[in-house]
Image (spheres, grey):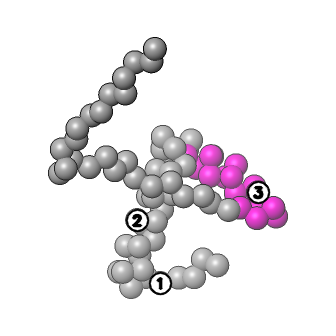
Amino acid sequence: MYAPIKTIKRNRNRRDDYGKSICVSIPFHKLDREEKMDEIVELEGWDSRSQMLLALVDKRYKAVKGGEVRSYV
């Protein structure tokens, strides 16, 4: 009737990790940030919001570790 299920043996050392997804919450009164993010992605040539956010985190991390601490809140 049905074709048998294929089992694929994988090497134990080979990992199938592809990263992690996170959800970013934007409050209603700051919904314009989504459009600003898309504009930054377009202007700076990023492929996605994800790449842009990771680059901003890296930049901010370097600034904090380098002693240039400013509050953005």
Q: Measuring 45% from the left and 71% from the top, which residue is drawn there?
A: 60
Residue positioned 18% across, 44% down in the render: 11
Does residue 18 show up?
A: yes
What residue is at 53 percent from the left and 82 percent from the top? Answer: 70
Q: Earlier in the sequence, mark 3 or mark 1?
A: 3
Q: Which residue is mark 2?
A: 58
Q: Which residue was labeled with disc 3? A: 31
Image marks 2 and 3: residues in contact by CB distance under 8 Å: no
Q: Main secondary structure of the magenta part?
A: helix
| Furthest residue in direction right, as rendered | 29
Label 2 residue SS: helix
Question: x, y percentage for residue 2?
Answer: 45, 18
Looking at the image, tell me whether mark 2 or mark 3 is earlier in sequence order: 3
The three-letter amino acid code for the residue at tag 1 is Val
How many residues crowd mark 3 within 10 Å: few (<14), some (14–19), many (20+)? few
Amino acid carrying mark 3 in the image? Leu
| First to last magenta residue range | 26-41
Residue type, mark 2 in image:
Asp
Q: Is residue 16 left or right of residue 21?
A: left
Residue 59: x %, y % from top left = 42, 66
The answer to whether residue 23 is left or right of residue 66 is right
Magenta span contains residue 14:
no
Instruction: Determine which residue is flagged by label 1.
Output: 69
Q: CA distance from mark 2 to mark 1?
A: 14 Å
Is 41 positioned to the left or the right of 68 in the image?
right
